Amino acid sequence: MESLGQHLKRERELRDISLNDLAEATKINIRYIEAIEADQFELLPGKAFVMGFLKNYAAYIGLDEEEVITRYLDFENAEMPESHKHPKEEILSSPNKKSTWGPVFIIIIFLITAAIIYYFFNVA
C-alpha cells in the first residue's frame, strides 16, 4: 500500500499540478509540501499545522479532505512508539506518580460539610 505522501504526490502529478502552483494556491511553503510528500511529518511545525496543510492540499487537488486526514492519523498512530500512544493513561496508572487531588478533595468535602452543619445549628 502506498504511503499518504506517495498518494498525495501521485494524485497531484496525475492532475498536472506543479509544486509551485500548489504552494501558491494553498500558501503552503514548498519545503512543507515536499516533506508531506516524503512522509516526513516531523519536519512540519506541529500537528495542527499538518492537519491544516493536509486539508488545504487535499481540497486544492480535489481529494476528500476527511479521507486524507484519516490516513494521516492512521500513519501517525502506526509510526508513534507504543509508549507515546496513550500518555494520559500512562501518567494516571504510573505507580511512581502520586496524585494530590484525593486528599484535597477530601478536605474540600469536609470543609463544605462543616460549613453546612455550622450554618444550620447557628442560624436557628
Image: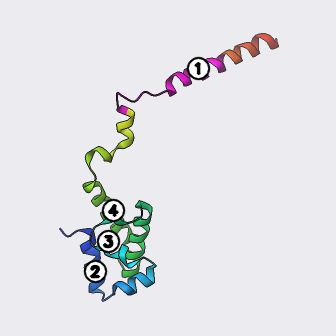
Report the residue marked by disc 2.
Answer: 11
Q: Quick one: SS at disc 1?
A: helix
Q: CA distance from mark 2 to mark 4?
A: 22 Å
Q: CA distance from mark 3 to mark 1?
A: 53 Å
Dot 1 amino acid type: Ile
Question: Which span of residues is magenta-colored?
Answer: 93-113
Report the residue marked by disc 4.
Answer: 42
Classed neighbour count for the residue bearing mark 2: other residues with Cα under 10 Å, few (<14), some (14–19), many (≥20): some
Closer to the chain start, of discs 1 and 2, is 2
Closer to the chain start, of discs 2 and 3, is 2
For residue 96, what is the image quadrant?
Answer: top left
Q: Is residue 64 above or below residue 73?
A: below
Based on the picture, tell me whether residue 82 belongs to the magenta stretch. Answer: no
Q: Nearer the viewer, mark 3 or mark 1?
A: 3
Q: Quick one: SS at disc 4?
A: helix
The C terminus lies in which quarter of the figure?
Answer: top right
Dot 3 amino acid type: Ala
Report the residue marked by disc 1.
Answer: 107
Q: CA distance from mark 1 to mark 2?
A: 61 Å
Q: Position of residue 36 (x, y in %)?
A: 32, 71
Report the residue marked by disc 3.
Answer: 35
Closer to the chain start, of discs 1 and 4, is 4
